[in-house]
Amino acid sequence: MAPMRRLFAALLITSLGLLAPLTQAQAADLTAANKAAHWLTTQVSSGALDDGFSKIGASADGLIGLAAADDPTLQPTIDTLLATVKAGAAAYVSSGGGAAAGKLAIVAAAYGIDPTSFGGVDLVAALKSGVAPDGAVGPYPSAFSSGLAMAGFSRAKTTEPTTLTTWLLTQQNTDGGFGYAAGAASDADDTALAIIGLLTDSSAIAKAALGKAVAWATAAQKSDGSWAGYVPVNSTCVMAESLLAAGVSTSLAKTYVVSQQLADGAITDGSGANLMATSQCLPLLGGVSYLDATWAPKATTKPSTTSPTSTTTTARSTRTTSSSTTTTTSSTGADVTATASGRGVPALTGDDGLPLLPLVLLGAGVVAGAAGVAVRRRA
């Protein structure tokens, strides 16, 4: 079986780039995304989202999710959340380190904000200082936190240290997946963020590791489209978004997630509407990932100034994304292209979510969870 697994991984490496434009173009369900986004707006209180861990972290998660929708009426809520996250950015990054900086760099890129001046914080500097000499990220290193930091470097268009990949590869299991720590059983959440991180590195060793991780992920998917996890819908969304970025079809996963959407637009975790699940699933519904989520609202139709019977409409930005190239057509008609696969040539278009299996990044900081207890991670 080992030779077959290696062959499958090799075939995946070859096919990822070929599949990406097709799968991503077909992936978005903006009707479902906008419904979920509007439910999120009803959850904002005192200018923030609150998931019980961190208002800044939850608000940042929400902003990444909202960027996947395209309804322009979401703008006031986006502005409110951005103001809140900027105001709390310094404390958040101080406590969360490189992973927190990576998450905010995704937010900054998604909304066209200079990552060197985000609420007075230089996220690029924070990303660099958040990587240890051996390439580990944060006080509780994991594949999840490494993936966030690597996505942050990519979105900030800043060369990432080669040690990031070096350390990340020490966490890969022989089955191709990644767990919350070296030697821990492979899980969907850590493997998903490892895939995101590996997509930012075009080296041969990263590509080989990526193929193995994708092979593990596709084999671990259940027949209903989901992945196992403390909260399956959360794990499914994080994993599917990462596979989408890698050019793998996620139609079955999206079908599963849509089946978990309530009438009011929220995503249920099985017990009712769940804020974290809704934020985490929005990118999948919108057909984007941490590497390319970008707020691109469709313009409202308005009467032409030259003819009372004609109208002028501007369609939402068209995303054509693969693991190697992201092309975004802005609302002004300008095309911007960036490469996500080359180290130091990151995607232009974008969690303190560290593993909450036994480790949790609470938006304002990283906290160790109970050993041996599987706890939901924040993304």
Image (spheres, rainbow, N blue to C red):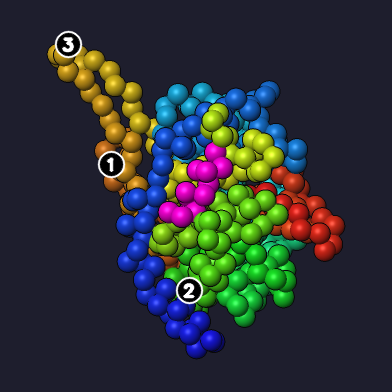
Q: Is 59 situated above or below 299?
A: below
Q: Secondary structure at mark 2?
A: helix
Q: Amino acid at mark 1?
A: Ala
Image coordinates for residue 35, horizontal then vertical, percent: 49, 32
Whole-angstrom CA distance, mark 2 to mark 1, is 34 Å
For residue 308, the mark is 3
Q: Is residue 294 visible?
A: no
Q: Which badge, 3 or 2, comes first in the chain's sequence?
A: 2
Residue at the spot of label 1: 334
Q: Quadrant of residue 260?
A: top right
What are the residue bounds of the magenta stretch? Answer: 251-261
Q: Callout 1 environment at 10 Å: few (<14), some (14 to 19), or many (20+)?
A: few
Q: Is 10 situated above or below 124?
A: below
Q: Secondary structure at mark 1?
A: loop
The nearer-to-camera label among 2 and 1 is 2
Taking the image as shown, residue 373 lies to the left or right of residue 76, namely right
Query: Is residue 229 within the magenta segment?
Result: no
Main secondary structure of the magenta stretch: helix
Image coordinates for residue 337, horizontal then vertical, percent: 33, 53
Taking the image as shown, residue 31 lies to the left or right of residue 99, namely left
The nearer-to-camera label among 1 and 3 is 3
Residue in the image at 47% along x and 44% along y: 285
Q: Callout 3 environment at 10 Å: few (<14), some (14 to 19), or many (20+)?
A: few
Residue at the spot of label 2: 211
